[in-house]
Image (tube, rainbow, N blue to C red):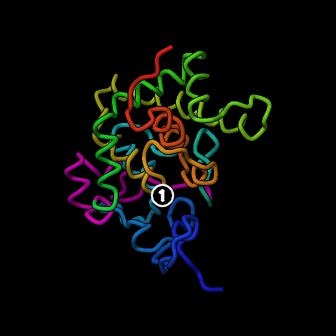
């Protein structure tokens, strides 16, 4: 059996890319379009894992966890950081990311612009979902999760809640320590959105959400962006 790129195959690309490497985090094979050898780290990551491994940390948030604390998907025990010259935050700004990762930056430019413009609203939506039961129920209705007794929807809602709560805790901690970089967090959201092949603001099938290893990113692209309906704004009661 001929090996093919995981993302290309999952997105039903007409011509799946030829594998260039295996993701250091999840082990999936990725072609040169769907994988990146991160500058300054020399680790190869698939694009579905990259946002949570390098872009969120560059924005001041912790990397995708290597256990069930909210990440999932990390094969072989998850990522191993801390070696000689290693870092989980390789980017200083959006401009720096675009300069050292030009291919990925170009591919994700449209999705990243959308998140850059409205990143504050998406974080407000995360607060709504994490801490306001009435607003959370409204977001669930907008997203289409309206069957409280359905076990699949129950699991999806629980995952979104974990992601929203963890995202807000991490953002608050980053703000308190002066490490928060909203531009790079927006880049992380945009790269994650592009990675699953769904335009921003559109409903996301569960199997596409499952491609993302980080629950914070699953919440944003699977609930916050969809609830925003293409015109992001905080959801009021």
**In the rendered image of this protein, does residue 5 appear above or below residue 125?**
below
Q: Identify the residue shown where x is 37% and y is 56%.
A: 86
Q: Is residue 94 left or right of residue 156?
A: left
**In the rendered image of this protein, does residue 164 appear above or below residue 92?**
above
| Residue 161 at x, y percent in the picture | 60, 30
| Residue 218 at x, y percent in the picture | 53, 43
Q: Identify the residue shown where x is 32% and y is 43%.
A: 114
Q: Secondary structure at mark 1?
A: loop
Crowding near the residue tagged with mark 1, few <14, some 14–19, many ≥20 C-alpha atoms within 10 Å: some
**In the rendered image of this protein, does residue 37 appear above or below residue 177?**
below
Let me know if residue 218 is in the magenta part: no
| Residue 12 at x, y percent in the picture | 56, 69
Q: Nearer the viewer, residue 83 or 108?
A: 108
Let me know if residue 103 is in the magenta part: yes
Q: Is residue 38 left or right of residue 80?
A: left
Q: Is residue 49 visible to us here?
A: yes
Q: Is residue 59 left or right of residue 153?
A: left
Which quarter of the image is occupied by the N terminus? bottom right
Q: Identify the residue shown where x is 62% and y is 60%.
A: 76
Q: Nearer the viewer, residue 82 or 54?
A: 54
| Residue 119 at x, y percent in the picture | 34, 34
Res 105 quadrant in image: bottom left
Q: Is residue 75 left or right of residue 152?
A: left
The residues colored magenta run 76-105
Q: Is residue 173 visible to us here?
A: no
Q: Identify the residue shown where x is 42% and y is 46%.
A: 200
Residue extending farthest bottom: 1
Q: Nearer the viewer, residue 200 or 68?
A: 200
Q: Nearer the viewer, residue 72 or 161?
A: 161
**In this figure, which residue is indicated by the disc labeled 1?**
197
């Amino acid at each position: 059996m001929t090996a093919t790129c995981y993302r290309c195959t999952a997105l039903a690309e007409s011509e799946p890319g030829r594998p260039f490497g295996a993701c250091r985090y999840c082990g999936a094979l990725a072609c040169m379009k769907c994988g990146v050898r991160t500058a300054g780290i020399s680790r190869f990551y698939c694009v579905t894992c990259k946002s949570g491994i390098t872009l969120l940390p560059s924005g001041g948030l912790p990397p995708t966890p290597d256990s069930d604390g909210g990440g999932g998907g990390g094969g072989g025990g998850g990522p191993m950081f801390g070696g000689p010259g290693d870092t989980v935050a390789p980017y200083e700004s959006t401009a720096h990311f675009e300069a050292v990762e030009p291919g990925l930056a170009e591919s994700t430019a449209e999705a990243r612009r959308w998140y850059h413009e409205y990143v504050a609203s998406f974080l407000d939506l995360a607060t709504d979902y994490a801490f306001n039961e009435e607003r959370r129920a409204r977001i669930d209705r907008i997203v289409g999760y309206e069957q409280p007794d359905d076990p699949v929807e129950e699991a999806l809602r629980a995952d979104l809640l974990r992601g929203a709560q963890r995202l807000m805790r991490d953002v608050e901690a980053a703000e308190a320590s002066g490490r928060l970089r909203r531009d790079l967090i927006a880049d992380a959201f945009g790269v994650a959105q592009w990675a699953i092949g769904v335009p921003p603001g559109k409903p996301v099938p569960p199997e596409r959400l499952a491609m993302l290893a980080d629950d914070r990113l699953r919440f944003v692209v699977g609930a916050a962006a969809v609830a925003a309906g293409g015109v992001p704004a905080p959801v009021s009661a």
